């Protein structure tokens, strides 16, 4: 490959990153992980995701430190014949200027294969991977949610 072609490809790649909405435009607040009994092997993470950009953001994948859990995935809760069931989402779309709530009874990040019992106040780092390959990490606090029935904002 000649150096001219290489330079052109690098230039094109940079132009592509600038053209797409990048991860930094997503504001992540109220990030929590549900405290579960030590026998539980899975839990869920919740947060408010606010897209501050003028373009839609697509989250393709979520990762978690393998020392904490085997896997992380985006799930949605759905009613089927009066029963709540969970379904994995291939992509989580956050429209431009809009907000998506990851919350109990709705969309959430499922953490499966917990390696150690969780402790209240413990922090867990999660990483969102966007469709353009960019990543954004955030910290969620393990919280006992049993006393949050009257939680308002
Ligand atoms: Cu789930």
Image (cartoon, grey):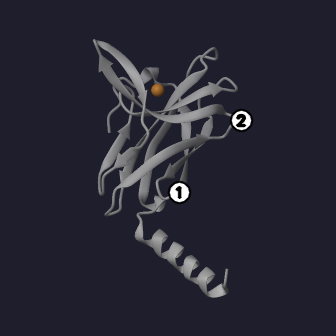
Q: Secondary structure at mark 2?
A: loop
Q: Residue at x 40, y 43 (%)?
A: 92
Residue at x 51% of width, y 35% of height:
73
- The residue identified by callout 2 is 67
Q: How many marks?
A: 2
Q: Position of residue 99 (x, y in %)?
A: 32, 48
How packed mark 1 is, by other alpha carbons closer than 10 Å (few <14, some 14-19, many 20 or more), is few
The answer to which quarter of the image holds residue 38 is top right
Q: Which mark is residue 10?
A: none
Residue 12 position within the rendered picture, expressed as x and y whole percent measured from the top left: 50, 77
Direction from residue 29 to residue 117 in the image, left or right: right
Q: Indicate yes or no: mark 2 CB to ligand 1 under 8 Å.
A: no
Rendered view: 151 above or below 64: above
Q: In the rendered view of the protein, which quadrant contains the N terminus? A: bottom right
Residue at horizontal 54 percent and vertical 40 percent from the top: 140
**Foreground residue, 10 or 78?**
10
The reply, left or right, for residue 125 in relation to residue 47 is right
Mark 2 or mark 1: which comes first in sequence? 2
Q: Quick one: SS at disc 1?
A: loop
Could you say which quadrant of the image residue 146 lies in? top left
Q: Please state, as top left, top right, bottom left or bottom right, where the C terminus lies in the image.
A: top left
Q: Which residue is mark 1?
A: 133
Left or right: 26 with respect to 10?
left
Q: Residue 82: x and y, percent? A: 28, 12
């Amino acid at each position: 490959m000649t150096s001219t072609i290489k330079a052109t490809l690098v230039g094109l790649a940079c132009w592509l990153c600038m053209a797409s909405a990048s991860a930094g435009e997503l504001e992540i607040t109220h990030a929590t992980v549900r405290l579960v009994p030590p026998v539980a092997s899975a839990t869920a993470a919740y947060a408010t995701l606010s897209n501050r950009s003028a373009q839609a953001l697509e989250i393709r994948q979520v990762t978690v430190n393998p020392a904490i859990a085997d896997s992380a995935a985006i799930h949605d809760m759905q009613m089927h014949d009066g029963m709540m069931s969970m379904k994995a989402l291939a992509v989580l779309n956050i429209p431009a200027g809009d907000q998506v709530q990851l919350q109990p009874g709705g969309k959430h990040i499922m953490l499966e294969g917990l390696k150690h019992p969780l402790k209240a106040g413990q922090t867990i780092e999660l990483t969102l991977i966007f469709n353009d390959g960019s990543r954004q990490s955030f910290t969620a606090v393990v919280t006992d949610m049993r006393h949050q029935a009257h939680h308002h904002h």
